[in-house]
């Protein structure tokens, strides 16, 4: 997926989980943050951020903000296996991007039928697929939390994530092939582990889902300032 127009800025503060103050072209702007997670290790005062620019875009005249914060340069030290040159790691933190790139990925996998936002029990599972005589359910989680070259999920307790894992496990009992896909929005990270220190219940649910036959896959991404792509 590609963003239509992007600009860079300097992060100042985050008054609440929906907005941030960013210096853009010499002015302080209130921008929309496209990730309601904590992101405390990413949004550090003075860091460089990437924003999607909606100024002058047709159909966006009534937007309350002119920009969406979609990416951030995270400073990492030389001991991190992801360290390159200036020690800055570009991370896509757009929480809507994982499902978009997952759809692009699925369209290239020769499924006979793909339906996003599939209603199963009391939840909406991200994707329902069919191939030959098999039925699949796939839930997508975006990973932006990185420590020493490894991804971790979640960065804050997620009751919704735990619920989805239990429902995928239940769906296995009903004959579905079930997949949990981690879209890794951090370049170079190849694996995601449960963040048990932050949300032990998610870790337990992940272990339970795996024991029931839910397949866990790690979708590595190429990250640029204006694009995200599963590789």
Image (cartoon, rainbow, N blue to C red):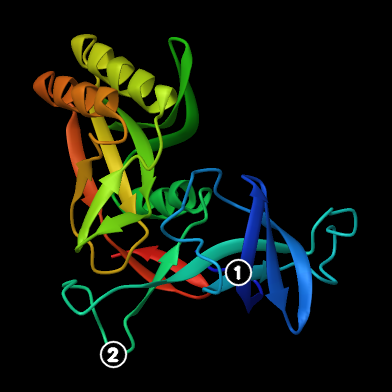
Residue at x 46%, y 53% (from the top left corner): 40
Work out whether residue 132 can be spotted. no
Name the residue furthest bottom.
85
Q: Which of the pair 197/53 is nearer the observer?
A: 197
Tell me: 182 left or right of 157: left
Q: To which residue does mark 2 refer? A: 85
Work out whether residue 45 can be spotted. yes
Residue at x 56%, y 62% (from the top left corner): 70
Q: How far apart are the alpha carbons under marks 2 and 1?
A: 22 Å
At label 1, counting other C-alpha atoms closer than 10 Å, the crowd grade (few under 14, some 14-19, many 20 or more) is: many
Percent position (x, y) of residue 198? 31, 35
Element carrying mark 1: strand
Element carrying mark 2: loop
Q: Which of the pair 112/222 is nearer the observer?
A: 222
Q: Give the tally of numbered discs.
A: 2
Q: Which mark is residue 183?
A: none
Quadrant in the picture for residue 77: bottom left
Q: Is residue 186 above or below residue 178?
A: below
Tell me: 203 left or right of 95: left
Tell me: 11 left or right of 137: right
Residue at x 12%, y 24% (from the top left corner): 213
Quadrant in the picture for residue 41: bottom left
Q: To which residue does mark 1 refer? A: 11
């Amino acid at each position: 997926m590609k963003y239509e127009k992007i600009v860079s800025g300097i992060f100042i503060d985050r008054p609440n989980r929906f907005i941030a103050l960013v210096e853009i072209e010499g002015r302080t702007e209130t921008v929309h943050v496209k990730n309601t997670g904590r992101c405390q290790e990413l949004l550090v005062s003075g860091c460089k951020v990437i924003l999607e620019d909606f100024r002058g875009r047709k159909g966006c005249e009534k937007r309350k903000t002119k920009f969406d914060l979609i990416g951030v340069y995270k400073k990492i030290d030389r001991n991190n296996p992801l360290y390159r040159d200036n020690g800055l790691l570009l991370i896509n933190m757009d929480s809507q991007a994982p499902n978009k790139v997952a759809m692009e990925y699925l369209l290239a996998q020769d499924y006979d039928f793909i339906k996003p936002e599939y209603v199963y029990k009391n939840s909406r599972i991200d994707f329902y697929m069919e191939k030959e005589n098999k039925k699949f359910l796939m839930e997508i989680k975006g990973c932006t939390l990185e420590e020493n070259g490894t991804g971790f999920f979640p960065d804050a307790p997620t009751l919704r994530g735990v619920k989805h894992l239990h429902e995928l496990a239940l769906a296995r009992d009903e004959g579905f092939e079930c997949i949990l896909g981690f879209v890794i929005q951090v370049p170079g990270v190849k694996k995601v582990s449960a963040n048990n220190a932050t949300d032990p219940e998610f870790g337990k649910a992940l272990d339970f889902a795996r024991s029931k036959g839910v397949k866990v896959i790690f979708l590595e991404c190429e990250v640029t300032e204006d694009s995200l792509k599963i590789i």
